Image (cartoon, rainbow, N blue to C red):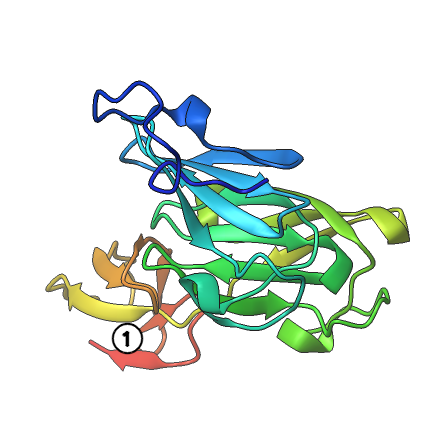
């Protein structure tokens, strides 16, 4: 079953509902956010559940009916979700195995499809141009810049790379001479507002700064 604690019966009559009054059906993955909330992949119920530090169990995302709809909270749907990972921004990533997709859930419960066409396959590509075959395990890579996927049906380990364009918040004042190099300090965020770091090199010949990973050049 998929009973949440707010749906359970107060059998003791003391006004308290414990986590053991909730029910799951085939929990298959766990991830904890920075506030101590535990997220559970509820496989047979096609749900993502949330358990607060005090033991309150609720449905965080999923309608409980198999499907692949994006949406917020229970307006979204999954089909036999398995793996789960979480990033520093408390975004969840789900191996939606029977949908052959990798789904993303923001901390506000907004569910989108990060990668996978939905048709079983092994094609590389960007976003929904890529394909998977029953992806199971999910692991967040170093600096939250990559996700590793155990692509069960393809007998492969796949890698998803995030290429969000940084938003430059500030840059240090620096003077670069033709025969010198310089270190520039950057403050930047990605498209989700999360802090990121990347290296900067100066082009000595032209006195420009080249931002690694960014196509723009900034004149000093």
Residue 141 visible somewhere in the drawing = no
Q: Is residue 34 left or right of residue 73?
A: left
Q: Is residue 120 left or right of residue 110?
A: right
Q: Position of residue 134 (x, y in %)?
A: 80, 54
- Which quadrant of the figure contains the N terminus? top right
Question: Which is more toward the observer, 12 or 99?
Answer: 12
Q: Is residue 214 above or below residue 85?
A: below
User: Quarter of the image holding residue 107?
Assistant: bottom left
- Which quadrant of the figure contains the C terminus? bottom left
Q: Position of residue 36 (x, y in %)?
A: 31, 30
Q: Is residue 215 above or below residue 25?
A: below
Residue 179 visible somewhere in the drawing = yes
Q: In the rendered image, which residue does mark 1 sit on? A: 207
- Name the residue at 21% across, 20% down: 14
Question: Which is more toward the observer, 188 or 105?
Answer: 105
Q: Position of residue 83 (x, y in %)?
A: 64, 43
Q: Position of residue 175 (x, y in %)?
A: 14, 66
Residue at far left of view: 173
- Name the residue at 82% across, 70% down: 123
User: Quarter of the image holding residue 20?
Assistant: top left
């Amino acid at each position: 079953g998929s009973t949440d604690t707010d749906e359970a019966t107060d059998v003791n009559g003391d006004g308290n509902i414990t986590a053991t009054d909730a029910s799951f059906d085939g929990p298959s993955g766990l991830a904890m956010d920075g506030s101590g909330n535990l997220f559970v992949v509820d496989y047979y119920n096609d749900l993502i559940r949330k358990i607060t530090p005090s033991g309150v169990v609720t449905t965080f995302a999923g309608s409980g009916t198999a499907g692949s709809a994006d949406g917020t909270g229970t307006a979204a749907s999954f089909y036999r979700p398995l793996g789960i990972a979480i990033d520093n921004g408390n975004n969840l990533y789900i191996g939606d195995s029977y949908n052959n997709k990798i789904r993303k859930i923001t901390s506000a419960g907004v569910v989108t499809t990060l990668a996978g066409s939905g048709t079983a396959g092994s094609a590389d590509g960007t976003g929904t141009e890529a394909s998977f075959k029953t992806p199971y395990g999910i692991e967040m890579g170093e600096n939250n810049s990559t996700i590793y996927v155990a692509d069960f049906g393809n007998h492969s380990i796949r890698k998803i790379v995030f290429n969000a364009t940084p938003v430059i918040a500030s840059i240090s004042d620096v003077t670069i001479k033709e025969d010198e190099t310089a270190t520039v300090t950057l403050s930047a965020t990605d498209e989700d507002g999360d802090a990121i770091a990347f290296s900067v090199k100066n082009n000595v010949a032209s006195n420009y700064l080249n931002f690694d990973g960014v196509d723009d050049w900034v004149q000093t």
